[in-house]
Amino acid sequence: MISLNQVSVQFNGKFLFNNISFLANPKDRIGLVGKNGAGKSTLLKVIAGQLEAESGVISKPSGATIGYLSQDIKPKAGKTIFDETYSALEELQELDVKLKDYTKQLETRTDYETDSYMELIQDMHVANERFSLLGGDTADAEVEKVLMGLGFMRKDLTRKMEEFSGGWQMRVELAKILVQRPDVLLLDEPTNHLDILSIEWLEEFLKIHTGTVILVSHDRAFLDNITNRTIDITLGRINDYKVPYSKYVSQRAERIALQMASYENQQKYIADTERFIDRFRSKASKATQVQSRIKALDKIERIQVEEQDNSVMRLRFPPAPRAGKVVVLAESVSKSYGDLEVLKNVDLMLDRGEKVAFLGKNGEGKTTFSKIVVGELDYTGKMELGHNVSMGYYAQDQAESLDSNKTVFETLDDVARGDVRKRLRDILGSFLFGGDDVDKKVSVLSGGERGRLALAKLLLEPVNLLILDEPTNHLDMHSKDVLKQALKNYDGAMIIVSHDRDFLSGLTEKVYEFKDKNVKEHIGDVYEFLDKVKANSIQEFSQKPKAVEEKPTSHKESKEEQKARKSLEKEIRIAKNQSERLEKEISTIEKEIADLDELMLDAEAYKEALEERDVFKEYQQKQQLLDGKMAEWEEAVNKHETLSSQ
């Protein structure tokens, strides 16, 4: 259990948080949320003891162990991946040394009857008990399991740390914390360098972890799957919600709406009371009532509406110039780094306006292929761009590779051409760089600010092919939502590499899976792909043996029959996933229509809403959208039933 009582931290005379208090209990799964710069990472450092609070008290149980994963690590060298991870088990290593020493002494000593000999045996027994209690007998297997869960191959475990990039070394740091199984896990953006499969493994690990977990993440799906509490840091204060992220969003909106309604009612009461006092203050016959109302006003506890930080990035991509029908054509593309072959005979075609996701474990070639399309890497095979194709590219390390010595304005001004230079301040303003912010050096920007600045560079000229490699790593929730909507509205072709399932959902219509040096096409969005991968895995490991038991047969499928069966199974999965996706969409639209119904029944609220939008037109549009989705759902269900009966 960790207790924070009236804790304050400030930088440059401004409070990041002021007099905040909360209690983290065992088995709590707490997500810290808020805009970039709100103080989430700072709060983790304060709890971890790496940063001292200006005031307040932080209480931790005596002997409690804390594991802290920072966003920033120092590169390691010298040890193998396995040895570096095992080095985190310091007590086990010390016990192992002691046990070896005790064993050596027992082999050479002969004073069996002495007190010191009996003391040695007792010490060895205690050390053995402690070694077993800490899992020393299975520690090697545990280290290997965690490393492989985080995406390492077994052959990687004996390779040196310096052979791996910063992202992979970050995985080792995470593994070192997980194998210790501390009482409190403090994780700052743990999914930033993980692929989707590794994120899912981490989710399962954290679900069964027996201690407290406090984490910062901009991955909405990860937060929803892990947390049972959400602490919102806004403008120096915190609000504690006992729900995961998505429920927190709706509860917060309801809370503020209730606050506003109560505030307005109270203000009306105060105004009416003050009018009564002013009107009858001079009349002796009303003196008692006037005094009574004055006292009532003095006693009233004034309602304050929770202050909100409503600043949000505004983003709209310029219309895409018209390109040829085929935007990218790859045939037999292969790429090796020395003896390491990453891609082998890859075929891929991207049409005009098509939006696709590249998924797969890290190291399988997603970024490599993206760089081949952009023209940054050599390769063998054929890679062609279509007629009139113009590209915008956001590299995985784009935010980190900005020139630290330049100002925000200079960063854009150096690459801008033509009339767009006259609009640079407007563009920067839409990315929340206003006033003096444009003169800040890149070196003092936060990770989120660098990410926004790197994205701003993409708007300097119209393009019809966007290639985005992990564009959301440093963006807060609001900025990610804005970027996602802008990409939905973008009318050009797009390739996006991302591990963020919620961000990808509904954004792309096709997934290319990078695996075993090749690329496999999957129709549908990210959740349909993940369902399919999981189904294949279950079929592989459990259904096939059962099928052999239930349906013994001497008939061997021909290649044509096998191909037809697999094609049918694929169509059934697609139809099933489509119907389930449409069910979710229909449920969301029905709730939106119900909310509009409720709004239109409230005459005062309806009148107020009409000042900002045409509610009835919005209602009609939602109803038409619902009718269309219902028709699509019925078609998908009928198709699934027809195919399943074949």
Image (spheres, helix red, strand yellow):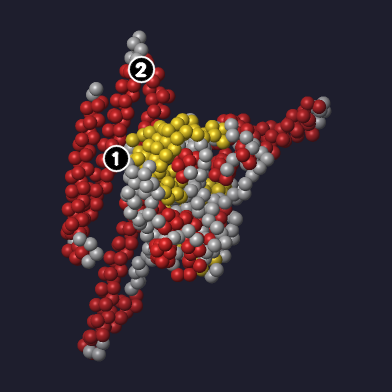
Q: Nearer the viewer, residue 595 or 422?
A: 422
Percent across and percent down for residue 199 are 46, 41
Q: Of helix, strand and loop, which one carries label 2?
A: helix
Position of 11 with respect to 470 (left or right) is right
Q: Which residue is located at x 38 percent, y 37 percent?
A: 349
User: Vertical placement of 637 versus 212: above or below?
Assistant: above
Q: Amino acid at mark 1?
A: Arg
Q: Is residue 471 left or right of residue 339?
A: left
Quadrant of residue 57 within the rendered picture:
bottom right
Mark identifier at residue 499:
none
Expressed as whole percent of the image width and height from the top left, the position of residue 142 reads 57, 33
User: Does residue 624 appear anywhere in the picture?
Assistant: yes
Q: Residue furthest top?
A: 554
On screen, residue 391 above or below 141: below
Residue type at mark 2: give it.
Lys
Please tell me which residue is depicted at 22% across the width and 89% down the height of the picture. 283
Q: Which residue is at the front of the view, 188 or 185?
A: 188
Q: Which mark is residue 559?
A: 2
Contact between labelled residues 1 and 2, with CB atoms less than 8 Å apart: no
- Disc 2 versus disc 1: nearer the observer: 2
Q: Secondary structure at mark 1?
A: helix
Nearest to the observer: residue 11 or residue 292: 11
Q: Position of residue 469 (x, y in %)?
A: 46, 46
Whichever of labels 2 and 1 marks the residue nearer the N terminus, that label is 2
Residue ID at (33%, 37%) = 524
Q: Residues within 10 Å of mark 1 (few under 14, many from 20)?
A: some
Q: Dot 2, crowdedness within 10 Å: few (<14), some or many (≥20)? A: few
Provide residue 621's location: percent of width, then percent of height.
Answer: 19, 52
- In the picture of the structure, the residue carrying the numbered disc 1 is 581
Q: 92 left or right of 355?
A: right
Question: Which image quarter holds the C terminus?
Answer: top left
Q: Residue at x 20, y 36 (%)?
A: 634
